[in-house]
Image (tube, coloured by chain):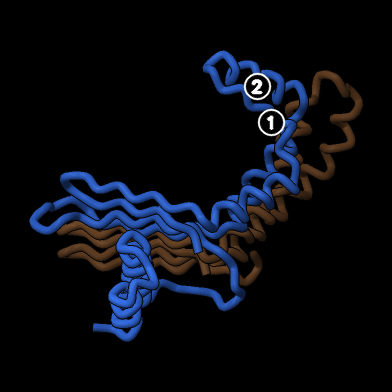
Amino acid sequence: MLFMMLVTKIKSNNHNINLYIPLILVFILYLIIAVFCLIAYPFLFLNYKKTVLPRWYLKVFFYLPKLISSAKGTYVEVISEEDNIEFYLK
Amino acid sequence: MSEEKTKILEMLSNGKITVEEADKLLNAVGNEKMLEQKNVPTDNTGSKFMYINVEPKEGKSSERVNVKIPFALMKAGLNIAGLIPKEAQDKINEKMSDKGMSFNLSDLKPENVKELMDSLEEFTVDVDSDDSIVKIFCK
């Protein structure tokens, strides 16, 4: 995930937009939230029965980097008469 | 005509393959060439992908769509099911059985996911409608 790049290219008759987003920016944001989640996680065990769903949400949140990493190679392209949209993760 | 296509037609004329097999092979070669021409970014890790191609028929103005999804993403998505708490799984199973799908999420084990992914390699869907041709395949 650290060295991945999200590329979005939009070509239309009048505009041509290319977006290159390094996922390290997403990872930095993720790290900040993850720190807060790690602090909150032990407190969720204080009321074990009522915090089943929040604990699940946190587990899914900690699973996100793996999910994003496995998306490497995803490619979506839509070509119409007016626009050409290309989106991929490399 | 490309070398691959000539070989396929030779095999067909020699009777080594059936017309259906030749059609499948020609389609596969065509899709490969199409993706090569479009410079679709590929990785050299030998990873497998599911391809979804929607091609408009000649004279039709519908959109052309190319999607490539790595197997690893599907596997990771399915593995999330294992993280779902038992209470939520029970609710999902109950709702699904109400709709006539007796599917138990807790049965979705990593080895089952691997088996599913392996069997997907043989998976192909061809839809030929009035406006477009949809092809879903894995390789």
Residue placed at 60% from the left, 17% from the top? Answer: B97
Q: What colour has chain B? A: blue
Q: Which residue is mark 1?
A: B105
- Residue B93 shows which numbered tag? 2
| Other residues around mark 2 within 10 Å, as few (<14) / some (14–19) / many (≥20) | some
| Other residues around mark 1 within 10 Å, as few (<14) / some (14–19) / many (≥20) | some
Coordinates of residue B110 in the picture (x, y in percent): 74, 47
Coordinates of residue A62 in the picture (x, y in percent): 74, 47
Q: Secondary structure at mark 1?
A: helix
Host chain of mark 2: B
Q: CA distance from mark 2 to mark 1?
A: 7 Å
- The chain letter of the brown chain reads A
- Residue A18 shows which numbered tag? none
Q: Nearer the viewer, residue A44 or A56?
A: A56
Is residue A20 rendered to the left or right of residue B11?
right
Q: Residue furthest left?
A: B59
Query: Circles 2 and 1: CB distance less than 8 Å?
Result: yes
Q: Which of marks 1 and 2 precedes in the sequence?
A: 2
